Image (cartoon, rainbow, N blue to C red):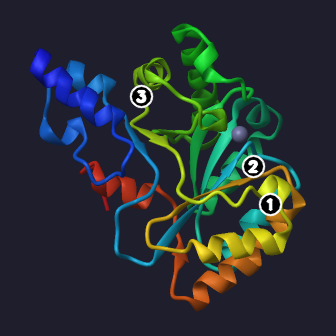
Amino acid sequence: MNGDLSICITNRLTTAHAYLTPCAEVKLPARCISIAILTIRFIDTSEKVIFLSFDDGPEPVFTPLALASLKKYQSQATWFILGKQAEKHPALLGDIYQGDNDIGVHSYDHVSLTGLSPWQIIQQLERTKTLINAATGQFWPYFRPPNGAYNNKVLDAAAAVGFQWNVMWSVDPRDYQSTPQQIINHVLVNLQPGAIIVLHEVTPSTTQALPILLQEIGKRGYRARSLGQYLQEFSGGNEE
Ligand SMILES: [Zn+2]
């Protein structure tokens, strides 16, 4: 059992990419599967796809505008939402889901998870997960801790709530302090297959940049997709 567990922990702490085999796929004991969680920063693919992610929403102005841009360019993204925002705007979760986008958990109120007890972390994640499920009937097993701050305690708590993926990013245009043109330039300079791009729903710059960004990546042969279409393949759970 100890040997199995060490394999599992090795996977859990890997920060390289999602190409590694998760525990579930190598059929380790249930105890091991329960703590298996992978940290990913990009998707290992040669396909010209990128993964836009929006943190801190849903937000009543920016979320509908982002959804309209994604729809116009037949693209998808992944939201990492706050539970307290979801409580205020539950219908927006349904709108995100209807656009074939994914909804992961950021936390309930953007507290730093590393400073909390395991039980408090579980409450932050579980409460938000429940709100997503109530609005969409779905559970996407991805989470992204506020400020990208995590440790083993956070990962163990997330795994206990059922999360399989701790999603970091490979491209950060710092949209909260950038102009639309700066955001676009940063993403285009760093454009490569499988990039995960972190954006936020707190600034008009991101909203203004998004349609131009989608148009520009399209010209370069890239599409923006939701993480789920790719992570499920890696976990062997693609049902399509
Ligand atoms: Zn955040």
Please say if the residues under marks 1 and 2 sit with CB atoms less than 8 Å apart: yes
- The x and y percentages for residue 235 are 28, 48
Q: Is residue 179 left or right of residue 170?
A: right
- Cα–Cα gap, marks 3 and 1: 29 Å
Q: Which residue is found at the position 53% from the left and 28% from the top?
A: 150
Q: Quadrant of ligand 1?
A: top right
- The x and y percentages for residue 132 are 61, 37
Whether residue 124 is situated above or below residue 37 in the rendered picture: above
- Cα–Cα gap, marks 2 and 3: 23 Å
**Three-letter amino acid code of the residue under disc 2:** Leu
**Three-letter amino acid code of the residue under disc 1:** Pro
Image-quadrant location for residue 25: top left
**Three-letter amino acid code of the residue under disc 3:** Gly
The response on whether ligand 1 sits within 8 Å of label 2 is no
Asked which secondary structure carries label 1, the reply is helix
- The x and y percentages for residue 56 are 74, 42
Whichever of labels 1 and 2 marks the residue nearer the N terminus, that label is: 1
Q: Which residue is found at the position 30% from the left and 57% from the top?
A: 233
Whichever of labels 2 and 3 marks the residue nearer the N terminus, that label is: 2
Please say if the residues under marks 3 and 1 sit with CB atoms less than 8 Å apart: no
Label number found at residue 162: 3
- Judge whether residue 238 can be spotted in this image: no
Disc 2 designates what residue?
92
Pick the quarter of the image with the C terminus: bottom left
Disc 1 designates what residue?
64
Image-quadrant location for residue 64: bottom right
Whichever of labels 3 and 1 marks the residue nearer the N terminus, that label is: 1
Q: Is residue 136 left or right of residue 46?
A: right
Label number found at residue 141: none
